[in-house]
Image (tube, rainbow, N blue to C red):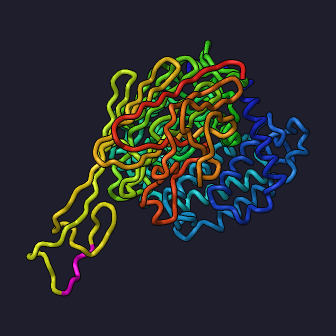
Amino acid sequence: METTTTDTAFRAQVVAAADRSVAAFLATHDDDAAALPHRAAMGRLLALAAVTTEPGSAFYGPGGDGAGGGGSTGGSAADGTGDAMRRCLDRLEQLQGPTGLFDGTNLCSPPDSAFTLNDACIALGIIRAVEAPGAALAAADGRLAGIISRATDALVAGGVHTPNHRWELSAALARINALQPRQDIADRIDEWLAEGIDQLPDGMYSERSALYASAVTNPSLLAIADHAGRTELLDNVRRNLTAFLPWFNPDGTLESVFSRRQDQWMDFGAAPFLPLYRRLAIQDANPDFAAAAAWLGTLPLHEPAKLLALLRLDPWLHAALPEGAAGATATDSTLPGPLAPAAAALETCGAYRFRAGSAVTTVYGGCDDLVPGVVSGLASNPTLLRFAHGAAVLSGVRLSRSFFDLGPFRSQHTVRDGATVRLSEELSANFYLPLPAARRREDGIYALGHEGRFSASMDFPGRPTVVHRLGTEVTVRAEQGQAVLELDFDGADTAFALELTFRSGGVLDGVVPASGTPEAFQLVQGTGSYRVGSDTIEFGPGLPADPDAPPAYNPGENYRYLAGTNASEGLKVFITGRTAGSHRFVLRGSSGTP
C-alpha cells in the first residue's frame, strides 16, 4: 500500500454499528442459536469474534474474552459473549454432516457450505491476529479449524448449480488453502477459473444481478485475487463496479429490474456495495469509486460486524479515501456527479437511463425469451419504464393486453437512438383446424405436446392453423423534465390496460377509483398527478372508461394457472383503451409549493 493513513472516523462508525447489531441479537435472540441455519449461526459467530477482538468495541475485554483490558464500557457489555460463541459453534458442529458439508435447504450443498466456510475463515483470521487470546477465543480457534478441515475434501470434490456458486466455492477454497495449503485445492481453483469469468461486454455478470454481484461474485473474486494471487480478477470487479455507477438512486437503492435473479422484483438497497467501492477506490486512487464509497457511507451499514472483520484483515478498507472524494451528506438526497451522468446504457441488459435536472427516466426492454416458462434464472420483469422527479417516484409502467392470456408486454427487440428507446414485441396464437387424413389415428390418442400456450394430446404440429397476431411497439423519449410514451399496435383489435404504479406515500389527484380493483384508480380524462411534498409527476391524457377494457393487470396464464402473480406493489393508476392505432402519453415532473 502507498498509504497507511487510517480513516478513524469510518472505523469508529463501523465499530459503533457493529456493537449495536451484536447487542441487539444478544438481548433478543441469543437463546435461539440451537435452531439457527448454518449460515446464520456462522454469521453470528463472526460478528461476536469481530467485536470481542476489536479494542474500540464495547465488547472488547475480559468479559468478552478479547485480547486486552476493557472496552469503552469497561467490559460489562461483553458479559456472555463467550457463551454465545460456544452456542454458535455447537450448532455448526451439529449441522456438519459426515462429509463435512452443512445440511440445509439444498441438503449437503458444497456452495451453500462455502458461504459458511468463507465466514469461518474470516473469523479464524481475526482470532489468529490476536496476540494473547483468552480461553473462549482459543477454543473457537481450534473448533473452527476443525470445522474447516472436515469440509475441505467435499469442497474440493463438490459441484455447483448457479454461475456465482463457482466463485463463492473458489473463494472458500482460496481462503482454506491460505490456512491449510494443499496442491489439490489450488488445482481445483484453477479448474473453476479456467471456465472464464461470466462477464458480459458492458461489465455485468451473466446473472445481471446487483444482489449477487455485491454479496457473492465481487467479494469472491477479491478473495481469490488476495488469497490465491490471481490479481487479474480485480479487473473483472473494476468493470462491474464501473457498470453499476449510473444505476444508483438518491433514496439509497440500486436499479435491479434487469436482473435474472430474485432482485428483479426488489427495491435493492445499495449499502452492500460500500466495501467493494471503498477497497478499489483506495487501492486504485479511483475518484469515481471514491465518490460512490463516500455516498454509500452515508447509508445505514450493511452487516457492520462482518465489515469490521474485513477492515481488520484488508488494510485497504480501513485507509482513508482519496482526497476530494465527493459524497452526499446523510441529509442530502443528491447523488455525486459520477453516479448521475446524463445518460447511461447496459446494452446486454436492454436497460437505459436518462437524467435531466431532477427527472430520471429508466427504460427497460431486456427480458429473456420465456419459452421454458417463467422460471428462476430468467429476466422476466415486465416493467418497461420508471420515472422519478425528486421524491415523486413512478416505480413501474406495465402494459397488459387481452390477447389469449399471453401476459404483459415484454420487449423482444430493443433499440436506442439518442434519448429515444423503441421496444417491440410480436405475439401470435393459433386456432387449429382438423387433422389431415394421413395424421389421424383410429384410437384418437395422440402424443402429448406443448404448442406454446398449453399442452394437450392433439398433434399440434400436424394441423393446419388459423393464426392471430398482435404487434406492439412502445417508444419512450426522454426530454427535459419529462418522458413521452407512445404505444403503437398492429393486428388484433382488443383491449389494453396501461398500469402506472407509484411508490406508496404520495397523493393522487385527477383520478377515479377503478371499478372492482381495490386500492387502484383509473384516469378517464385529462391529466392526473402524483405529489410527494413539493415534487409532482403529472401523467396523461386519460382515456374514457370502457366496460370491455377492464382496469386491471394480467400476469398471464403462466402465473394465473398456478394461482400466482408478479403484480407490483404501490398506488396504481390504469389507463385503458383499444389496440387500434396509436396512443401518446406524457409523464412530466415539476417542483413547487404543494
Location of residue 81 in the rendering, given as x and y in whole percent from the top left corner: 81, 52
**Residue 445 lies within the magenta run:** yes
Left or right of 94 on screen, residue 586: left
Left or right of 489 on screen, residue 233: right
Q: Residue at x 76, y 29 (%)?
A: 12
Left or right of 357 on screen, residue 64: right
Where 156 sits versus 511, above or below?
Answer: below
**Where is the C terminus found, in terms of image quarters?**
top right
- Name the one closer to the observer, 280 or 141: 280
Location of residue 303 in the rendering, given as x and y in whole percent from the top left corner: 67, 42
Location of residue 455 in the rendering, given as x and y in whole percent from the top left corner: 32, 69
**Residue 528 lies within the magenta run:** no
In the displayed orientation, state which residue is furthest to the bottom. 443
User: In this rendering, does residue 237 appear at all?
Assistant: yes
Magenta: main secondary structure equals loop
Location of residue 284 in the rendering, given as x and y in whole percent from the top left corner: 50, 21
- Name the one closer to the observer, 412 or 290: 412
- Name the one closer to the observer, 42 or 560: 560
Rendered image quadrant of residue 478: top left
Left or right of 64 on screen, residue 410: left
User: In this rendering, does residue 124 appear at all?
Assistant: no
Q: Residue at x 15, y 72 (%)?
A: 435
Rendered image quadrant of residue 367: top left
Q: Residue at x 40, y 34 (%)?
A: 583
**Residue range of the region highlighted in magenta in the rendering:** 443-448
In the displayed orientation, state which residue is furthest to the top. 324
- Name the one closer to the observer, 32 or 117: 32
**Where is the N terminus found, in terms of image quarters?**
top right
Rendered image quadrant of residue 431: bottom left
Q: How many marks?
A: 0
